Image (tube, helix red, strand yellow):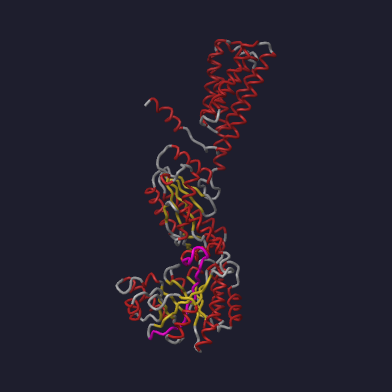
Amino acid sequence: MILELPARAARLLPSGRRLPEEVWQSRHRAIVRLAIGSAFCLVLLAWVWGFGQPAAVAVLAAVAGPLLFALPRFGRATRSAATTVSLMAACGALVHLWGGVTEAHFSFFVMIGVVALYQAWVPFGIAIVVVAAHHGVVGTLFPHAVFGHGGNANPWLWAGIHAAFVLAASLAHLSSWRLNEEQVLSDPLTGLANRTLLEEFTHRLLARGGAVSLLFIDVDDFKAVNDGRGHATGDELLLVLAERLRSCVRPGDVVARIGGDEFAVVVDGGPEVARAVGERALVALSVPVPLDDGLLTVHCSIGVAASSDVTERTAGALLRNADLAMYLAKAQGKNRLVVYADGMAEAARRRADLAQDLAVAAGAGQLEVHYQPTIRLRDGRTTGFEALVRWNHPERGLIPPVEFIPLAEETGAIDGIGAWVLRQALRQGAAWTAETGDPVRMAVNLSPRQFHDGSDVIALVVAALEETGFPAEQLTLEVTEGVLVRDGDAVVAQLQALRALGIRIAIDDFGTGFSGLSYLRHLPADILKIDRSFVTDLPRGRSAVTLITSIVELARTLGLDIVAEGVETEDQRRALADLDCGSAQGYLFARPEPADRAGAALAAGVPVRS
């Protein structure tokens, strides 16, 4: 119990930031040089003032001796204590050599300022103890050498007075230190901790030896909020999200803002505790935020890393692993939590390599377009094709679209890829129309980024139609509800202009985006495509039947056509036909195939009817 008292007392003291290692080392080297210089000057002063060799040796031993413990093999506390003892001994030696004149005592206050550079409690405590001991003990033994002003009558009283002055100077430095940290260690917008304080707090938790976890939280599509609604709205949103994060954590956990739309939470506990905090955050952050210009719903992606999964117990390692897990959460579709596991670093490197290769894939001839037919359920006739891009990597073979399409979205490569696919598909559609004598409809997907990255979608489509000679009336452009999340009015205007050309607009993955019913009245549309997630549960899933029935009835009311995606079984086809679904796509009818095989099947199979 008695042995634990120093540690308990240390925990009661307010703790500031731990200096970065390179900063601490730089300051320590400078203080060591000062201590060595002080020892040399005092020895020279003792010799000049005629104190003799014994006094010079004693001064050298008192000032330089403690520096043996300031070497790199010792820890920070020991090394800072050693230099503090050396500097305080130098002050005491100066007072003694100078006969106790008042000006000599000023050196103590100078050295207090020097050891304040360590930004730690140990040097201040040592300074107070050394001053009190020197003035009390040495002042009793050699009163005139310490108290030249006549304080030798009561040396311990004057020792207390001098120690009080040193304490006052220490507190002044400590206050300045803490006030400065409050300014530089908090986020100016949200008031949360910033990255520096987060790393310091994490380091202290790790130093205790227990389980520590870190959550890396990124707001999904925050750039769209800033671009579409303005930075003032973005800042207002961040303030609300910061407050919600505070409400999700436990006392003792620290929430920090470490980037524009990036937050982190340090949890004093293992991955199970961190997962519980993260799941609360997912729910809390997804609640619609009331802003001046209406409700705004956002989601976040969260990565979790635990100290048990890192080889080096450092804040940097935890942040790196949590960032990798968050990156994977983004790649898996966003709005989810992923816990770090071995292999994620390799997966991140693979994605980085793929992103680099993807930038040149179209120009290198690695991309190709596959075509999947759309079948009318009433009579089984092919009514057209959807163009789907595939990537045949020269080293890794066929890369799944679920892997490279999100990557293309993230990097912006989707703009070039989308334009290339559009031209290829229209060229092929024109060829099939000429070969069969029937108007072959062609559906091409447009990415939300193609509407928002400054590219002129209308000019792109018009140029492709003119270049290929494909009739606009046979073209269907597929978009998701997500195109409206950013600058919806401008997107609607572009879609209306495309419809004015005779092009049909299909809403892809209907019902899975931004509350489809409310957005549908804004989107100019001709076709609703039922997402495969609803079709999978047919024919036995009651909720799927109810949802599809509602979508079909809604489409009929609005005069829209219906296409169901992902039909893989005869039971699903029959159920959709019974629900009056107009058309369907899926492996039951045909897989996406290259143009030569899809064209061969078209020539030998059922004729196309629009």
The relative height of residue 248 versus residue 475 in the rendered view (above or below) is above
Q: Is residue 30 left or right of residue 377?
A: right
Q: Quadrant of the N terminus?
A: top left
- Can residue 451 be seen here? The reply is no
- Viewer-side residue, 376 vs 17: 376
- The reply to whether the magenta stretch includes residue 393 is yes
Residue 188 locus on image (x, y percent): 56, 48
Place of residue 334 in the rendered image (x, y in percent of width and height, measured from the top left)? 45, 60
The answer to whether residue 368 of the structure is visible from this angle is yes
Residue, far bottom: 437
Q: Residue furthest front?
A: 395
Q: Quadrant of residue 113?
A: top right
Question: Is 486 or 149 nearer to us in this picture?
Answer: 486
The residue shown at (47%, 56%) is 347
Determine whether 200 is above or below 543 in the image. Answer: above
- Residue 568 against residue 360 in the figure, above or below: below
Quick one: which residue is furthest to the right in this view? 48
**Magenta-drawn stretch, dominant element (helix, strand or loop):** strand
Task: Please provide the residue range marked out in magenta.
Answer: 379-400
Of residues 426 and 217, the one drawn nearer to the viewer in this rendering: 426
- At which x and y percent is residue 295? 47, 63
Specify whether residue 285 is painted magenta: no
Task: Please tell me how many numbered marks the rendered image carries.
Answer: 0
Indicate the position of residue 553 as horizontal and vertical percent values: 38, 79
